[in-house]
Image (cartoon, helix red, strand yellow):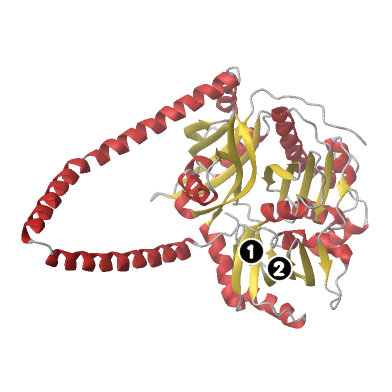
Amino acid sequence: MAASKAKGKLVSIVINNEYIKICEITKSGKNSVVHKTVTIPAPEDCYVDGVIEQTDVLAKAIKVVMDEHRFNANNVAFSISSPRLATKEVLIPNVKANKIDKLVQANATEYFPVNMDEYIIQYTVLEKVEDQGQEKIKLMVAAVPSEVVESYYGLAKALGLKVAFVDYAGNSTYQIMKQQIGPEVSLVIQVENDGTVINIFKDNVLQLQRNVPYGKSMLVNAVMEKYGLKYEAATTKLQNETLLHSRFDGDEVTESLRYMASNINRVIDYYVSRNRVSIQKAYLIGHSTTIKGFATLLSNELNMPIEKVETLKNITMDKKAYVEEATLTSYVTNLGAVFDPVDFVPKRMIDSGVKKDNTKTLVIALIGAAVVAAALVLVPLGRVVMLNAEISKLNKSIDKLSSINQVVDDYYSAKDKYNDVQAFAALTADSDDTLQNLIDYMEKSIPSDVVIQSINVASGSISISGKADSKASVAKLIQQLQANSSILNVDVPTITENKDNAGATEVTFSLSCSYIGEATTTQKNTTK
């Protein structure tokens, strides 16, 4: 659910393992005023897979620069980009706005094959659509581990700031980019340090969003290895020299981007084949815009022109503070976060709110009970006897009904199994029995020590759980799945390594992916 729109002055902070970006912003109507911007290196080992580590060290680094630049806002907004964050487009019945959250929470386990007790769910309403003759609501649902959100709240406390909201990079990008592009079917590629967000828009509405766990840092690492440079020097070299070739030709630096380009192509093919439309425009934002040759390479490999986003609409600069307009595009996540954020709230705070509500309910109940008691004193004795008899009758009915709980539980369990079988059958039918091809492929290609324990199918989405002798074997399985052109968006929500008393290692895992049947080759739009 979207948070209440940001008001007043905010400090917007984005963190990854390379840098910390800090903006001071005031949201005013459809526009945002930028007062200050600053980027500092991230202290080592303070950010791990989206979780803030060494909170005091990180807070000290941020405080120093905020004091130096005289940031004075009391509220902080975060936009997170954890590789453990998952998103999914979902269609729900056309219900009232106040019913959406309960519906999403109730169906969360259908969206994400993870232990939902460990995750926080939020959503963004995208649009109303017609599906099989019925009006439905299209949502972008996001799930993030609770520990990630908790770590940001801990950082805010160490900074002495109040959390306005915790958004995520995918939504922040969507909210600002829908104001920058036209109604055409557009591809927006945001390359950040530790990941890439792939967005497809139509009529300024997000149609599809995928996260690729491959960002600029992998490219920088390739430069470091080839030229024997440190991280900062390698980054500077990429910005000042054209190290990337125009095509993949075996050069180790250029080849380091093949995985990213391949995944972008897969997302495009998936969308185009499903919707029978072509991509009309493509935009590049984020840190990749400063890398020489990056846009040319990607344009050639995707077979479409790519436009760099170098200015932003609806963003103005405070005349009292010096902010270079040319630098604002590197703060796109910070800026987008204030427009219409979601709000990931720690479960302890939600539970606290529930307890308060329960306390209020209890007080009301006690007052009501007192009123009833007073009334009973006043009514005739015969009426009291009749009421007691009625209560006794109701209690007996409750005792009889209590046994139904197990029946209901059994019913829903059986229904869930039936729905799974139906979904599997439907997918098999829709794909002309190509699902069997997938199973055959897995049997031939998975590592020998990987054991698949379960495969669940629902509307083209597949979730797999299993065990292996090592994480390396799981990684090989993922590579094998990604090599199959019928499989898209392979994600690993959970992976756990344990050792028994004898010292033997066992890795349990779950992964999810989309299956589109036999690969479809679709000519992409090449309009210049």
Residue annotated with mark 1:
47
Q: Earlier in the sequence, mark 1 or mark 2?
A: 2
Looking at the picture, does residue 288 appear above or below residue 57? above
Numbered disc 1: secondary structure: strand
> Is 192 placed left or right of 162 in the picture?
right
Where residue 309 appears, as percent x and y from the top left, is 85, 53
Residue 473 shows in this picture: no
Residue annotated with mark 2:
42
Q: Looking at the picture, tell me which residue is in the foreground, 18 or 148.
A: 148
Res. 518 mark: none
Residue 348 shows in this picture: yes
Which residue is drawn at the image coordinates 69% and 67% (left, top)?
A: 13
Which residue is drawn at the image coordinates 57% and 28% (left, top)?
A: 442
What is the crowding at mark 2: few (fewer than 14 residues within 10 Å), some, or many (at least 20)? some
Where residue 83 appears, as percent x and y from the top left, is 63, 52
Where residue 330 appears, as percent x and y from the top left, is 80, 61
Quarter of the figure with residue 234: bottom right
**Which amino acid type is shown beneath numbered disc 2?**
Ala
> Which quadrant does the C terminus fall into?
top right
